[in-house]
Amino acid sequence: MKKQIILFVTCLSFVLTTSAQQIFLDKVSIEYVKTVAVWPLIKEIEPEWFERGKDYMPKQTVSYFNFTSDGSKSLYKRTKEAEIPRNMWFQPFADNNLVYNDYTAGTTISQKPIYEDTYLVQDSLLNIKWKITADTRNIAGFDCRKAIGILFDTVTVFAFYTDEIMISGGPEGINGLPGMILGIGIPRLHTTWFATKVQTTDINSKSIVPATKGKKGNREYMRLSLTKDMERWEQYGKKMLIAFVI
C-alpha cells in the first residue's frame, strides 16, 4: 500500500510539473516578415519578359507586419514597407492591408488599398479546408505543427501553427487552425510570412479596432469590381486578385 501511495504521488507530481510547463497564451503581439520571391513570380508569368528585364527587378522584397490580439479579436497591419532600390522596378501588391478579425462573431473587416481605390471589405472569416500533418517546425521559439489548406478550391496554403497560443488566426485573413499560425507559404504567390518575435506582455487591446474608410462591400463585391481590371493583366492579374482577396 505504501509503495502504491508513493507511486501515485510521483505520477501526480510529474503530471503537475508537465502541465505547469505548458503555457497557453491568448494575448499576443507578433512580428511577421513577409517575403515575395519576385524573380520566380515574374518568370512564371512572363518568361520572355522576365529574361529581358530581370536585371531591373529585385530578386525578392521583404516587408514587416504586426499582429495584435486580445484572444477574441485581432488586428494585422504593416509596420514597414518593402524597400525597392531606385534603379529597380517592382510594385508590391496587397502589401498594405489592415485586417481586423472577430473570432467570436466569425467576421472580418479589412481595409485594402488597391491602386487609386480603397476597399473596406466586411465579410465572414475565410473558409479554408485544412489537413493537419505530423510535420513540425520551431518558429520564433514555439513548436509548430504543419497543416495544408485549400483556399477558393484551388489555392494551396502551407501553414505552421502552435497550440500554445490559443488564437485561431494568422497573417492577413488566414485562420481556422486550432492555434496561432506563425508561418505561411502560398506557392501560387511565391510568398511566405514567418513570425520573428512573439510578445506576451503590454498588449494594447484598445488599438484592436477596425478601419472605417473605403468602398464598403463583401469579398465578392471587391472581386467583381477588380475582375475587369485584372483581366487586362492576364496571369499577373489573376495572381494579384488572389493576393487582394486573402
Image (tube, rainbow, N blue to C red):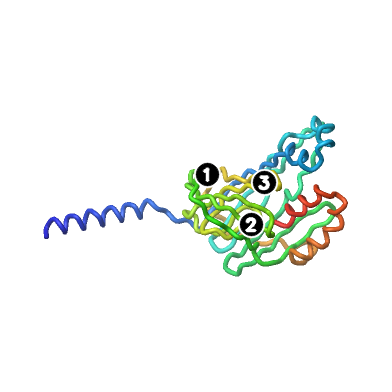
First reached walking from the N terminus: tag 1 or tag 3:
1
Task: Check contact, mark 1 vs mark 3: CB within 8 A.
Answer: no
Residue in the picture at 73% in, 48% down:
95
- Of 237 and 68, nearer the camera is 237
Residue in the picture at 61% in, 55% down:
149
Could you give the CA–CA distance between mark 2 and mark 1, rounded to whole angstroms? 22 Å
Give the total of numbered labels.
Answer: 3
Element under disc 2: strand
Amino acid type for the residue under numbered disc 2: Ile
Residue 96 in the figure: left or right of residue 140 = right
Could you give the CA–CA distance between mark 1 and mark 3, rounded to whole angstroms? 19 Å
Residue in the picture at 25% in, 55% down:
11
Task: Check contact, mark 2 vs mark 3: CB within 8 A.
Answer: no
Task: Check contact, mark 2 vs mark 1: CB within 8 A.
Answer: no
Q: Position of residue 57 (x, y in %)?
A: 78, 34
First reached walking from the N terminus: tag 2 or tag 3:
2
Residue beneath disc 3: 187
Residue 48 in the figure: left or right of residue 144 = right
- Of 143 and 166, nearer the camera is 143
| Residue 100 showing in the rendered view | yes
Residue beneath disc 2: 150
Instruction: Classify 10 Å Cα crowding around label 2: few (below 14), some (14-19), many (20 and above).
Output: some
Element under disc 3: helix
Residue beneath disc 1: 139
User: In this rendering, is residue 27 above or below 136?
Assistant: below
| Residue 83 showing in the rendered view | no
Residue 163 in the figure: left or right of residue 99 = left
User: In this rendering, is residue 72 above or below 137?
Assistant: below
Q: Which residue occupies the extreme left position in the image? A: 1
Could you give the CA–CA distance between mark 2 and mark 3, rounded to whole angstroms? 12 Å
